[in-house]
């Protein structure tokens, strides 16, 4: 089930795991598996990948990183198939993503003997990239084409729990989410405050932007690990962030 209308679909370079996610969700539809269970499953896959990196098994690590991306696409698909959207699932998914990103980079830092301060900068950069992608994408889904209700352009208040979820759980996960993501959201909003006023985002722009999606970031990680280029991962994430300012400039100048 697509998040966008047919005419607004674009080639999302970060969404290569969607087909696998749809198949997995379809097979889980009639089971007792919930979207939360699937989210936990992709977390486990990410931790296995981390263990493989630790033991210099880069090919196996790449497999579990890509598997994580595929499973990551399945929790949302399963929620839509079962018609059980939840803020709990939305926030838990994002919390797992940022924690796994941090763990991935810390292990890469240790194994490649990269300076810790460079690794922390890379973590900041990779999160800023992902936030820009999500910012524009959520605007497209919600404001421009009427997307799902659980992803909001601005996270500024605790949402009211949806049917079937606990308000206390939503509140706790929201607060954790804000601690982890709040600063990145504020930075991107500051850099492009008026993005939500745009009438449309061209498909070519969204495809270009999708190189900052988490899926594509992990694809780069998997490819570079497979070729034994682990020591170049941290510099790549830092240098590639320069594209962020170009994308924002294009949006401000040409997309209104």
Image (spheres, rainbow, N blue to C red):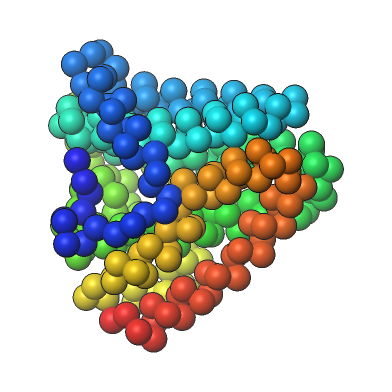
- The x and y percentages for residue 71 are 40, 30
Residue at 52% across / 69% down in the picture? 244
Q: Is residue 60 above or below residue 94?
A: above
Give the residue furthest to the bottom.
Answer: 253
Apparent side of residue 177 relative to residue 116 in the rendered image (left or right): left
Can residue 111 be seen in this snapshot? yes
Number of marks in the image?
A: 0
| Residue 17 falls left or right of residue 97 | left
183 with respect to 157 (left or right): right
Give the x, y percent position of residue 66. 50, 35
Residue beneath the point at 22% across and 49% down = 3
Which x, y percent locates residue 114? 81, 48
Q: Is residue 121 visible?
A: no
What residue is shown at x 60% (from left), y 58% (from top)? 125
Say which of 255 and 156 sits in front.
255
Name the quadrant of the C terminus.
bottom left
Q: Can you say whether 52 is above or below 243 in the image?
A: above
Decide: is 194 above or below 238. below
Q: Quadrant of residue 94?
A: top left
Task: Residue lying at the far front in this picture: please name it.
Answer: 227
User: Can you say which quadrant of the picture contains the N terminus?
Assistant: top left
Q: Residue drawn at (82%, 50%), measured in percent from left and top?
A: 115
Question: Picture quarter containing residue 156?
Answer: bottom left
Between residue 22 and residue 108, name the one nearer to us: 22
């Amino acid at each position: 089930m697509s998040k966008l209308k047919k005419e607004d679909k674009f080639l999302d370079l970060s969404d290569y795991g969607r087909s696998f996610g749809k198949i997995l969700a379809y097979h889980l539809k009639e089971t007792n598996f919930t979207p939360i269970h699937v989210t936990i499953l992709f977390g486990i896959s990410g931790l296995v990948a981390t263990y493989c990196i630790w033991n210099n098994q880069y090919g196996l690590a790449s497999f579990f990183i890509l598997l994580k991306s595929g499973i990551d696409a399945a929790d949302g698909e399963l929620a839509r198939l079962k018609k059980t959207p939840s803020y709990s699932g939305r926030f838990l998914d994002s919390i797992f993503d940022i924690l796994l990103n941090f763990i991935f980079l810390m292990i890469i830092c240790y194994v490649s003997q990269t300076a810790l301060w460079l690794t922390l900068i890379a973590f900041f950069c990779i999160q800023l990239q992902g936030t820009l992608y999500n910012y524009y994408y959520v605007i497209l889904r919600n404001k421009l084409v009427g997307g799902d209700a659980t992803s909001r352009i601005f996270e500024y208040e605790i949402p009211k729990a949806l049917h079937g979820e606990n308000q206390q759980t939503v509140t706790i996960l929201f607060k954790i989410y804000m601690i982890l993501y709040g600063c990145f959201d504020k930075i991107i909003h500051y850099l492009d405050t008026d993005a939500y006023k745009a009438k449309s985002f061209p498909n070519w722009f969204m495809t270009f932007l999708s190189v900052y999606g988490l899926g594509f970031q992990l694809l780069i990680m998997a490819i570079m690990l497979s070729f034994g280029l682990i020591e170049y991962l941290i510099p790549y994430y830092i240098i590639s962030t320069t594209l962020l300012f170009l994308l924002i400039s294009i949006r401000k100048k040409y997309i209104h």
